[in-house]
Amino acid sequence: MNAAAARADDAQALIRIDGLSKSYQRGGQQIPVLLDIRLSVARGDFVALMGPSGSGKSTLLNLIAGIDQPSSGRILIGGVDIAGLDEGELADWRARHVGFIFQFYNLMPVLTALENVELPLLLSGLSARERRAHAEAALAMVKLSDRLDHYPNELSGGQQQRVAIARALVSDPQLIVADEPTGDLDRVTGEEVLALLDRLNRELGKTIVMVTHDPKAAARARRLVHLEKGVLVDEPEPVR
């Protein structure tokens, strides 16, 4: 096991990946994207995944989030091997355990900020009043209590991303995955979003795995993991 895989104490690990490989079929060829990945992420850590385009960063993030499934290997999240779940089990697991933040927000344009944040709770069994209370609390956390009834096209890019972060938080997931969360934002707004992610990690103890091309964004993380051509490259220990 390499240093990147061994860095987190397994007893405290939220994520444990062992022998993970992923290939895609293209015509008659198998195209390898990830090769024998071994990685541990401790509970409450903030990890940045970096690497050149095509290195497999987003593929690894999607596998950790249960959006995609590996060709081989194991992904244990909180002790559950999600690589062994069927589609229905995986969808249920995602809804309960993972919050998603995307580069282009992925908000529903016909729904208000409040309604967008409520979406992950629709299958939760909560009453309409409880869902609204949870969504209002999440929007208050990202300082958007005055934008509850605004539609996405009435919000700035930074405000839309904060709605997306509130949506990721509303079900109180153990894991937040972020794919280039500042990639569509200007520098100042991007810094505000990164400061919010930092606060979620340090004050609320959320485990965050973030893909980014931006060294300044990566500097907000507690730990850097680098991918080159589908293989993990060891990085020096970060300063925490």
Image (cartoon, rainbow, N blue to C red):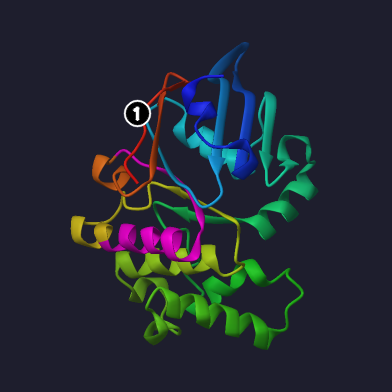
Rendered view: 96 above or below 3: below
**The N terminus sits in image quarter:** top right
Q: Secondary structure at mark 1?
A: loop
Q: Is residue 13 visible?
A: no
Look at mark 1 in the image and give the residue it sits on. 236
**Measured from the top left, where is residue 37 in percent x and y?**
56, 23
The residue under label 1 is which amino acid type?
A: Pro
Extreme residue in the top direction: 28
User: Does the magenta run of residues contain 206?
Assistant: yes
User: Does the magenta run of residues contain 11?
Assistant: no
Residue depicted at x 72% and y 40%: 82
Total number of numbered labels?
A: 1
**Quadrant assignment, res 122:** bottom right
| Horizontal arrangement in the rendering, residue 26 relative to residue 232 (left or right) | right
**Measured from the top left, where is residue 144 in percent x and y?**
39, 79
Rendered view: 111 above or below 197: below
Q: Is residue 86 visible?
A: yes
**Quadrant assignment, res 211:** top left
Rendered view: 3 above or below 60: above
Residue depicted at x 51% and y 80%: 137
Residue depicted at x 80% and y 41%: 86
**Quadrant assignment, res 19:** top right
| Horizontal arrangement in the rendering, residue 1 relative to residue 213 (left or right) | right
Please report the bounds of the magenta region as a residue range. 192-213
